[in-house]
Image (tube, rainbow, N blue to C red):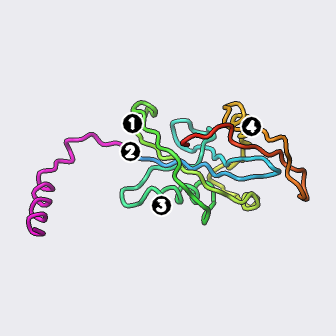
Amino acid sequence: MAKAKQRTRSSETERYDASAFERLSVAVDVAPIHVRDGAFGTLLVRRDAHPHRRCLALPGTFVAVEESLDEAAARALRDKAGLSGVYLEQLYTFGAPARDRRTRIVSVAYYALVDAQRLEGITLSAHDVVTARIEVRRRTLASGQLEATGERQREVDHRPAELYRFARRSAV
């Protein structure tokens, strides 16, 4: 039985013609999320290549043939934002055929959780790195997903945060 499976796999591999399919590129983009002064923020880098040269963007890169998506995301953070050893998680995949004018690119989005204190020492000569505030609460409240409980945190050494709950149960 094992030899029959082996023979089938081998003959299928021999018949497979990779050139019959158009090639596409795979990229990763990472949103390094931090909290500073009670507000969410992310890190943006100034692009050094076309298109959109000199524009601010999330750190990203093309995935090399020999590396995993996670390895490419870690490399993008290290090489473009000077960050390593942070929590990374895959978030979403963008694959609309005409979303990039250069070629067909499938982009895998990641987020990274970054201690805001680590951002203080970032200096990269090749890239401008800036932090940008993210207005999460306003957008989330406007979506109707959360509602205020009318309560605030208790017994904290800082301004107490307002508490929220999900407005409705959902599968997400």
Q: Which residue occupies the foreground of this view, 159 or 88?
A: 159
Marks 3/1: CA distance?
A: 23 Å
Describe residue 61's horizontal placement relative to residue 65 as left or right.
right
Q: Are marks 1 and 4 in contact (CB under 8 Å)?
A: no
Q: Are marks 3 and 1 in contact (CB under 8 Å)?
A: no
Marks 1/4: CA distance?
A: 43 Å
**Which mark is first along the chain, 4 or 2?**
2
Asked where in the image residue 116 lies, by quadrant, the reply is bottom right
Badge 1 is on which residue?
103
Quarter of the image that includes the C terminus: top right
Query: What's the mark number on residue 25?
Result: 2
Q: Does 90 appear above or below 4?
A: above
| Type of amino acid under label 1 | Thr
| Type of amino acid under label 4 | Glu
Task: List x then y, in percent, for residue 110.
Answer: 54, 50
Marks 3/4: CA distance?
A: 38 Å
| Number of the front mark, 1 or 4 | 4
Marks 2/4: CA distance?
A: 41 Å
Q: Are marks 3 and 4 in contact (CB under 8 Å)?
A: no
Question: Element type at marker 2?
Answer: strand
Task: List x then y, in percent, for residue 61.
Answer: 49, 50
- In this rendering, the count of numbered labels is 4
Asked where in the image residue 82 lies, by quadrant, the reply is bottom right
Badge 4 is on which residue?
147
| Number of the front mark, 3 or 4 | 4
